[in-house]
């Protein structure tokens, strides 16, 4: 039946879907940049408020959680992996975090920036494989926030 239907203006439904996904991918890439910029600002604010920075960390969690959930959809599996690592690290924060904890957060944000500056689909597996042990060591040294 699909073969019997003429394509509108020479386009198929697949072309329309590809165009729509391309537009959404561009929106995602813009959103990543804006979210990372906001997260960096929140880290700086949190450093200035070491006695009361829980709300900063919670907002970072929300922003990164959204990116994590969309990374795979738009061809950025490393965004999902790094985002999951950061979300797991700060998910249950109930007390102000230290400068050491914020270093862990900043390192995750820089990793997100790095992998999103690559073309979607460009292999980042080697980078991820090298990054994981370093993040794990950094997390071990900083300890888990409470």
Image (cartoon, grey):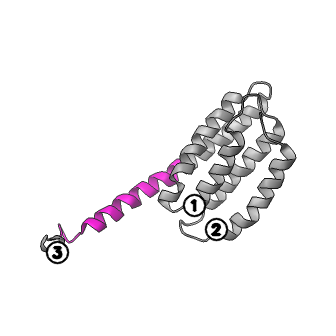
First in residue order: circle 2 vs circle 1: 1
First in residue order: circle 3 vs circle 2: 3
Magenta-colored span: 7-31
Asked whether 26 falls inside the magenta stretch, the response is yes
Q: Mark 1 — residue?
A: 77
Q: Which mark is residue 36?
A: none
Q: Mark 2 — residue?
A: 124
**In the image, is residue 113 above or below residue 47?**
below
The secondary structure making up most of the magenta span is helix
Residue at the right extreme of this rendering: 141
Cα–Cα span, label 3 and label 2:
39 Å
* Left or right relative to 139: residue 111: left
Asked whether 19 falls inside the magenta stretch, the response is yes
Whole-percent x, y for residue 83 in the image: 63, 50
Labels 3 & 2 near each other (Cβ < 8 A): no
Q: Secondary structure at mark 3?
A: helix
Q: Secondary structure at mark 2?
A: loop
Whole-percent x, y for residue 5 in the image: 13, 70
Q: Which mark is residue 3?
A: 3
* Quadrant of image for the C terminus: top right
């Amino acid at each position: 039946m699909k073969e019997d239907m003429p394509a509108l203006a020479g386009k198929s439904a697949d072309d329309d879907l590809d165009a729509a996904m391309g537009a959404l991918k561009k929106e995602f890439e813009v959103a990543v940049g804006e979210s990372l910029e906001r997260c960096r600002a929140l880290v700086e604010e949190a450093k200035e408020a070491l006695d009361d920075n829980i709300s900063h960390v919670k907002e970072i969690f929300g922003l990164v959680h959204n990116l994590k959930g969309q990374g795979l959809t738009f061809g950025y599996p490393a965004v999902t992996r790094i985002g999951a690592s950061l979300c797991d690290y700060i998910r249950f924060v109930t007390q102000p975090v230290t400068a050491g904890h914020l270093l862990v957060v900043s390192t995750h944000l820089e990793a997100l920036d790095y992998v999103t500056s690559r073309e979607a689909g460009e292999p980042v597996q080697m980078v991820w494989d090298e990054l994981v042990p370093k993040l794990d060591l950094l997390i071990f040294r900083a300890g888990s926030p409470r």
